[in-house]
Amino acid sequence: MTIRRTPRRTPRRIRGAAAVAALAGGISACAAPGGGPAGDGAADTVVIGVASEPDTLSPLLGYGKDGNSKIFDGLLTHDADLALRPALAQDLPEITDGGLTYTYTLRGGVEFSDGEKLTADDVVFTYRTVLDAGTNNTYRSELDAIEDVRAAGDATVVFTLKYPYAPFAARTVLPIVPEHVAGKQDPNTGAFNTRPVGTGPYVLADWRKGEKLTFKANPRYWGPEPKVKSFTMAIVEDDDVRATRMRAGDLDGAILPPNLAATFAKDGGRRTYDATSYDFRTVTLPTANKVTGDRAIRRALDAAVDRQAMVDKILEGAGRPAYGPLPLDDPWFAKGIERPQDLAGAGKILDAAGWKPGSDGIRAKDGRKASFTLLYPSGDKVRQDHALAYASDAKKTGIDVEVESATWEVIEPRMKNDAVLAGFGSTGDPDFGLYTLLHSSLAGDGFNNMGRYDDPAVDAALDTGRRSQDPAARKTAYDGLQRALVENPGYTFLTHIDHLYVLADRWQGLTTQVEPHEHGFSSGPWWNIEDWQPKK
């Protein structure tokens, strides 16, 4: 069978001067990381600026679980159009027993980077370790459908499911780790987390925490030899600093917010790539907070925000209003839930619930002011601007939102009680992003269900969507879920954002995919850097 996910919009657009308004500013012809003047560097070495680094490089703890890991491979992978294609498996799975059994045959001749042969036992070890309750990952629920995984000889892996799970094949992009290395270590604390061994096109050469990760071509890679022999991911948290280093020639490429990407629009030595995404910006509204836990407050905030203005002014058009967790052009989007800003409606909701304006314009109820803190991660200009716009809209209804920047180390212990300007979104089946975002069983499980949302109707819809193979039943469930979120919002959904990347124009045939929330490190035009070809 063919398993395919077709993006709703063209996955690749190159934004030129006509598409992006250039801002004033000179571009210096400084030395590029690959050597020579900017745009003339060697094509076999690349330095990319990204905003963050992974906590671990172990797939057992979540690294690369959605694909595009350069160190590892899954049984399957995604192509540019997000269609599934074989990777470590020699073909797409054989699906039998009414969707309860998935059988994969491994590609022959694959070795790990240490020279050991890949076998079915490595696949079994990977999945069983991920499913072990003693392994500290927060994505175990994504593999809930698995009843058993076993090897049938060295080259065959058989998954038995508890229930037919329509999108299961897309879960098998999970990277496979070597049992002979990882099996001898504690998956939570072992050296494998920072010194990984895989089958992918690159190996980790160096990791300086907080500074950079350097990768070199894997001489034992089973696929074609990469033309890019090494690449470095430079960790530059601040958007402005990333743009400055790009302009100075210190970086070959970078992910940038729209206003900064626009400054490179007239630079003939660089190109700007625009990837549409499922990545949304939202405000978590913790139920434990006496203000954000009030349903009337949440509904009023949903009505008060001007989503289109955020797209126009903050994203400079590089995005779409978010009326829920699924983008407008997704086939699973519930038509009719689009809603404009309605300040009068927000006021009526608050009045009816007993939130009355005070002399300072801020509402109060039973002696408690309608006031709460909204945290956003330091250095993220796009989130900062969303947070400030949100606070401004909220104040028009008499709700006081105090915006505060902090590091994630500070934010994480506070997100049970304080609102957070967060980002989520997964490509593929709606189960992939919605279950971990909303199901009450995952409330407070790391960054899953951050606001501890709990709605029995939404839980029921999520369970139906996960367990049913009937497309009509699933569509009805997800439609109902999205409508329930309008009536009982646990988040204020703001925008779906496009991801903008600037890259030295030294390679050809580059594309982007429709991207999830996770971007920059494994997405962008370098999602398939092993396939890049230098310009002639």
Image (cartoon, rainbow, N blue to C red):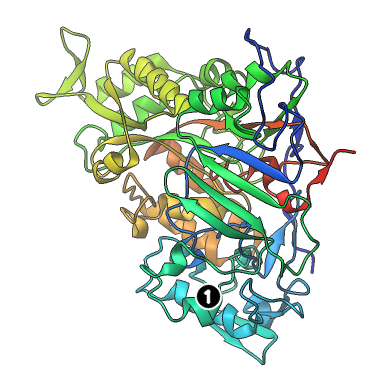
Instruction: Give percent across and percent down for residue 9.
Output: 74, 37
| 201, above or below 323, in the image | below
User: Disc count in the image?
Assistant: 1
Nearer to us in this view, 364 or 450: 450
In the rendered image, is residue 286 in sight? no
Q: Residues within 10 Å of mark 1 (few under 14, many from 20)?
A: many
Nearer to us in this view, 467 or 153: 153
Quadrant in which the N terminus is drawn: bottom right
In the rendered image, is residue 262 in sight? yes
Instruction: Give percent across and percent down for residue 68.
Output: 64, 55
Tell me the residue that label 1 is attached to.
126
What kind of residue is marked 1? Thr
Quadrant in which the C terminus is drawn: top right
Nearer to us in this view, 533 or 20: 533
Outermost residue on the bottom side: it is: 153
Of helix, strand and loop, which one carries label 1? helix
